[in-house]
Image (cartoon, helix red, strand yellow):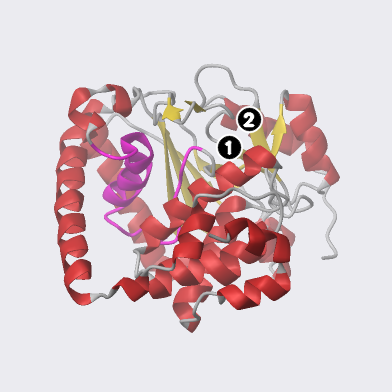
Amino acid sequence: MVFVSNDKESLQEGLNFILSHFQGPVFPRTISTYKTNNRQIEVFDIETAIGFFEEAKFIDCKINAYPTYTEYKGINRQAPDFIFIDLDKSTFKTERTLKLALNKTLRNIKEKLDDNNSNPTVLWTGNGYHIYQPIDAFVLEQEEVFSKFDKPSKTFLRFSEQYLSDYRSDPSHNPSFKSCMIRVPGSYNSKCIKEGVTKEPSQVKIVQRWDGHRPKINLLLGSFYAYLADQKVKELQRQKQKSSTESSNSIIQWIERLLQTPIEDYRKNAVSLILAPYLINKKKSSYADAFDIIEEWLSKCADLRPLDFNLNYRIKYDLNNAMKKGIPPMKYDTLKNRNRPLYDKLCT
């Protein structure tokens, strides 16, 4: 890619603006850039973040909406206090329908969050609109009514994006506390540059500034609880249908063991050649369930050795590829030839 930017001042202003959306300790937090191949790197101050952004020529500069430490011993301790809605132009037929979806989303935020008082940040990313709405929230796992559901705080991030956008948000966007990477105004979108878009449209720009108001999460909790209850019923129905229509051949024990075994290397191949095809094409898991399972496995792998790739992008790419091509998972004997140490580790 032949592209050079020296807009350091613009990016510094953009980063300071984004940081104003966050509560509590701002750092440590992860950032990523084009030069890191979108791999997340933990930083502890603004100066270090700017250094990485400058090194990447300000291309694909992102920062996590949530701090690094969001859980303790597997228990979530982070409130879902930042709603991220992604309206990707590739999912709309025309620019007009994209703009209509943006206007409808902004109306929904006003009507459903705080009686017409909410004005979120809106960014033009070069490929659509990002909407950032900070809210006054609490850890849902600590509330009795939600504690019976699995990971309600993370689920709320995904529900609120879909609900407030009338389910027009990017269907492959699955925000979580570890992968909620947001673009910094003043940076540049590499996809636009690759497609030959001129410098100006490829720059991430502020369309509307957040007004500093944090509506309370309570205003969405009734609809969220109804959604969780409905999803639980549907999941029970799916499980019942699976048990009556699928044979035990849909379960591959050595891959199930792999999902319980974090590893230090071979992670990208394991996702693309084994886990994604297995979950999508063999177990018939939903996209969202498969995403969560692989994300959890990769997070455990990262505890052994940091990942050298972007977790969110990797999972989405491999799941979409498995769905599109219908490929089966790698065979156990093939693993024996390709990675004997892992094969031996998974032997019964």
Local secondary structure at mark 1: strand
> Helix, strand or loop at disc 2?
strand
Which residue bears the numbered disc 1? 64
In the rendered structure, are the residues bearing label 2 and label 1 in contact, judged by CB atoms less than 8 Å apart?
Answer: yes
Total marks in image: 2
Please check the rendered image and state whether residue 329 is part of the magenta-colored stretch, yes or no: no
Q: Nearer the viewer, residue 85 or 13?
A: 85
Single out the residue that lies furthest toward the top.
24
Amino acid type of the residue tagged 1 in the rendering? Asn
Q: Residues within 10 Å of mark 2 (few under 14, many from 20)?
A: many
Residue 66, given in percent of the width and then of the height, sits at: 53, 32
Seen at 71% across and 42% down, the residue is 305
Amino acid identity at mark 2: Arg
First to last magenta residue range: 149-177
6 with respect to 153 (left or right): right
Q: Residue 164, percent across and down?
A: 29, 46
Earlier in the chain: of badge 2 and badge 1, it is: 2
Residue 309 vertical placement versus 181 (above, below):
below
The answer to which quarter of the image holds residue 25 is top right
The x and y percentages for residue 328 are 49, 79
Image height check: is 259 above or below 248?
above
Residue 336 showing in the rendered view: yes
Q: CA distance from mark 2 to mark 1?
A: 6 Å
Q: Report the front residue among 118 and 264.
A: 264
In the rendered image, is residue 185 in sight? no
Is 203 placed above or below 274 here? above
Q: Which residue is drawn at the image coordinates 82% and 65% (left, top)? A: 1
Q: Is residue 290 above or below residue 39?
A: below
Disc 2 target residue: 29
Q: Which mark is residue 178?
A: none
Magenta stretch: includes residue 151: yes
